[in-house]
Image (spheres, rainbow, N blue to C red):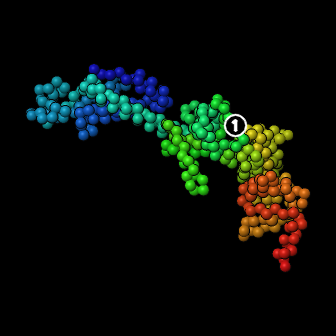
Amino acid sequence: MPVKLKNVIETVAKEKNIPEEVVEKALKEGILLAVRKEFKIKDRDAVRVLFDKNKDELKVVLRKKVSPFVSDPISEIALEEAKNYDENADYGKIVEVPLSLEDLGRIALTVAKDVISQKVAKVERDILYEEFKELEGKIVTGTVRRFENEDIIVDLGRLEVILPAEEQINKERYSIGDRIRALILKVSKESSYVIKEKNKVKRVLRLSKGPIVILSRTHPNMLKKLLEIEVPEIVEREIEIKAVAREPGERAKVAVYSQDKNIDPVGVVVGFKGSRIQNISNELSGEKIDVIEWSEDPAKFIIRAISPARAKKYRLLTKEKRVEIAVPKDELSLAIGKNGINAKLTHKLTGWHIDILSEEDFERVQKLKTK
């Protein structure tokens, strides 16, 4: 008796959010493998699984050879019996014999169920992988679901993802149920993600199902994407972000540029009374953001990047890609920044090694070099 499966296929497809064709194919493949295992059939072509969508009927048939002497009832059939299925049956011909699902037995049905589950799960993982791979490098919003050691597991609706401790802003604290925005840093088909430190494995992250998706709130691209969201002129390409440097949660520098001389890129990005940059700063737990106009002239760019300190003199050492900068003595600590943060960010932003000196020390070094 044919088995009705249309509703089952529709339900599974809806629950897993995958095409009905995928579920149907997995179902047929599962039944096929179960029958072959139950009856120890090596030849894949000896079994056919047929599903008629219009009639909502599933049939399983064994292809048997008509033989005068039946030694193997699984692969052979007597002529008299064969004519019950094909009136034109004759010796040597192949006859398709319907198999009731009851004949499969409890073991076969269990195998079919397992295979179907595995295949549907694999397809579901593949679909989720492709879906989230397209979101790699973009910002998403999710809900804090739980904590695993210092890592945060975030629910994005269809998938639970990881915000590792290394990708969190240190001073931020979350509770279960909090909303959280983060950059999708990495999407992997692998069942685990390795965090390395100085080329050595620090630890391995795993989730029970689905692709591994790693979030970040510390990556420079997090700030870049927030700027794109807040400043439409960047998306419209009137303004270009040339470089981003961050000390997450503390301070950041952003270099912007516009080919249109009538546009003030810094002013546009900062916004009226600093409104745009303040919104982003609030999202990043008060991270102070310096917006700097980029220049193809490295000296001009570096001098702007060292702000809020004022560079009085400079000396470029091009071969070493290093620059010596002289600032007023009372601005030396400002130029270096707390724990060297301003000098460090200037280096990250420009790619040049920065030596910051007082004007007096700058002149003294210069005199020594000329002797």
Viewer-closest of 277 and 248: 248
Vertically, is 192 above or below 1?
below
Vertically, is 16 above or below 185?
above
Quadrant, the C terminus: bottom right
Q: Give amino acid for label 1.
A: Arg
Residue at (73, 38) in percent of width and height: 283
Do we see residue 260 in this rendering? no
Q: Quadrant of residue 347?
A: bottom right
Vertically, is 4 above or below 210?
above
Callout 1 secondary element: loop
Q: Quadrant of residue 85?
A: top left
Viewer-closest of 94 and 177: 177
Residue at (30, 30) in percent of width and height: 108
The residue to which callout 1 is attached is 173
Residue at (12, 30) in percent of width and height: 78
Left or right position of 310 against 281: right
Quadrant, the N terminus: top left
Q: Position of residue 295 (x, y in %)?
A: 78, 57
Residue at the extreme bottom: 371
Do we see residue 68 in this rendering? yes
Left or right position of 83 against 214: left
Residue at (83, 41) in percent of width and height: 274
Q: Position of residue 344 (x, y in %)?
A: 75, 56
Q: Position of residue 123 (x, y in %)?
A: 45, 36
Q: How many residues crowd around disc 1 within 10 Å: few (fewer than 14), some, or many (20 or more)?
A: few
Residue at the extreme front: 149
Left or right position of 233 against 143: right
Vertically, is 64 above or below 338?
above
